Image (cartoon, helix red, strand yellow):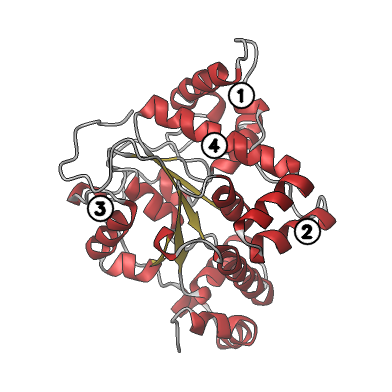
């Protein structure tokens, strides 16, 4: 569990609760910043927590500590707390039974279309009404997520929970449900690097990789509308790697956390993140390094294809030629 030493000069009260959602696309540095923030004594990072129930049921992906989610002592202690909150007996297992993942769009396209319209453009009262009226299963999943966050806070004695799920619908649904607690860290990385990573991992063609990246950026941007500017912050992966100290000082200031140099030590504290980049398992890594393999790996044809599909979005984010 956490080292609960007092943090001098804490920028906000210790009883202020916050849910920090890491938005953006996969392979944009979300796991890196997740692990760094987890070093802070007031923070508990849980990774892509929306997959918690899936991984607990299937044991297809271990907790970052290396144990299966269903037998991880950390998650079992939190499950016991959740059992009390739900009034369940010892024969019930919240880790496997309480769904917190939103229904995939392909399962219910009509619902997804209605929800997108509400979450992307509508002001908070309208969006919350639509979510409750037309997507009650999603609303239950978000409300159950808030219970999990409270259980995690109670067990770890922390006040800030980091959720790096990145799903844009979840981003807006969390804000609509708990606007005062919500903070958004929008992780941004050169789309060519993200696309190259997708090609390496899955073998998908550049056209699809560029489209998926552009869509995730657009969805994050649209769902951010209506969230106060002082509750959201953009963090560029490249800046984080080139000057981690300056970047993390800004992030800590945004979150009301006292910065300390120990934050920059990879895997200083044991992590229990769900999902994320495989780097979370590399306990030997101690330095933050910039990954720009895309510069050597992408062909001229692939670069032209990316520019045709997503070059405008990439330049909008500050990445030129």
Q: Mark 3, residues whose alpha carbon is within 10 Å: few (<14), some, or many (≥20)?
A: many
Q: Are marks 1 and 4 in contact (CB under 8 Å)?
A: no
Q: Which residue is mark 1?
A: 94
- Residue at 56%, 71% (x, y): give it: 195
Q: Which residue is mark 3?
A: 264
**First-in-chain label (4 vs 3):** 4
Secondary structure of residue under mark 2: helix
Question: On the rendered image, what quadrant is the C terminus found in?
Answer: bottom left
Nearer to us of marks 1 and 2 is 2
Question: On the rendered image, what quadrant is the N terminus found in?
Answer: top left
Instruction: Please indicate, yes or no, whether residue 60 appears anywhere in the rendered image.
Output: no
**First-in-chain label (1 vs 4):** 1
Determine whether 321 is above or below 179 in the image: below
| Residue 114 numbered tag | 2
Q: Mark 1, residues whose alpha carbon is within 10 Å: few (<14), some, or many (≥20)?
A: many
The x and y percentages for residue 277 are 48, 52
Q: CA distance from mark 1 to mark 3?
A: 34 Å
Question: In this view of the protein, which residue sits in the foreground, 151 or 75?
Answer: 151
Q: CA distance from mark 3 to mark 2?
A: 42 Å
**First-in-chain label (4 vs 2):** 2
Instruction: Please indicate, yes or no, whether residue 213 appears anywhere in the rendered image.
Output: yes
Nearer to us of marks 3 and 2 is 2
Determine whether 39 is above or below 152 in the image: below
Determine whether 256 is above or below 46 in the image: below
Q: CA distance from mark 1 to mark 2?
A: 30 Å
From the viewer's perspective, tell me whether residue 209 is left or right of residue 157: right
Q: Are marks 1 and 3 in contact (CB under 8 Å)?
A: no
Q: Which residue is mark 4?
A: 146
Q: CA distance from mark 4 to mark 3?
A: 28 Å
């Amino acid at each position: 569990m956490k080292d609960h030493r007092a943090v001098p000069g804490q920028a906000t009260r210790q009883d202020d609760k916050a849910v920090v959602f890491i938005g953006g696309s996969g392979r944009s540095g979300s796991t890196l910043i997740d692990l760094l923030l987890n070093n802070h004594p007031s923070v508990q990072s849980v990774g892509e927590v929306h997959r918690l129930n899936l991984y607990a049921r299937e044991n297809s992906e271990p907790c970052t500590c290396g144990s299966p989610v269903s037998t991880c002592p950390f998650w079992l202690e939190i499950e016991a707390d959740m059992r009390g909150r739900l009034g369940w007996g010892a024969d019930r297992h919240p880790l496997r039974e309480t769904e917190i993942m939103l229904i995939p769009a392909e399962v219910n396209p009509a619902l997804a279309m209605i929800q997108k319209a509400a979450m992307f453009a509508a002001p908070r009262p309208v969006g919350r009404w639509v979510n409750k009226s037309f997507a009650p299963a999603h609303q239950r999943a978000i409300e159950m997520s808030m219970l999990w966050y409270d259980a995690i806070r109670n067990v770890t004695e922390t006040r800030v929970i980091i959720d790096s799920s990145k799903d844009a619908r979840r981003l807006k649904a969390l804000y609509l449900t708990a606007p005062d607690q919500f903070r958004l860290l929008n992780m941004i990385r050169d789309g060519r690097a993200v696309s190259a990573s997708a090609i390496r991992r899955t073998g998908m063609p550049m056209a699809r990789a560029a489209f998926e990246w552009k869509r995730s950026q657009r969805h994050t941007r649209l769902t951010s509308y209506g969230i106060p500017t002082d509750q959201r912050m953009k963090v560029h992966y490249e800046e984080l790697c080139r000057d981690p100290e300056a970047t993390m000082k800004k992030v800590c200031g945004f979150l009301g956390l006292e910065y300390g140099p120990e934050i920059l030590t990879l895997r200083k504290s044991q992590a229990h993140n769900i999902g994320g980049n495989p780097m979370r398992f590399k306990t030997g890594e101690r330095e933050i390094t910039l990954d720009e393999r895309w510069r050597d790996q992408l062909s001229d044809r692939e670069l032209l294809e990316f520019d045709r599909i997503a070059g405008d979005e990439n330049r909008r984010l500050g990445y030129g030629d």
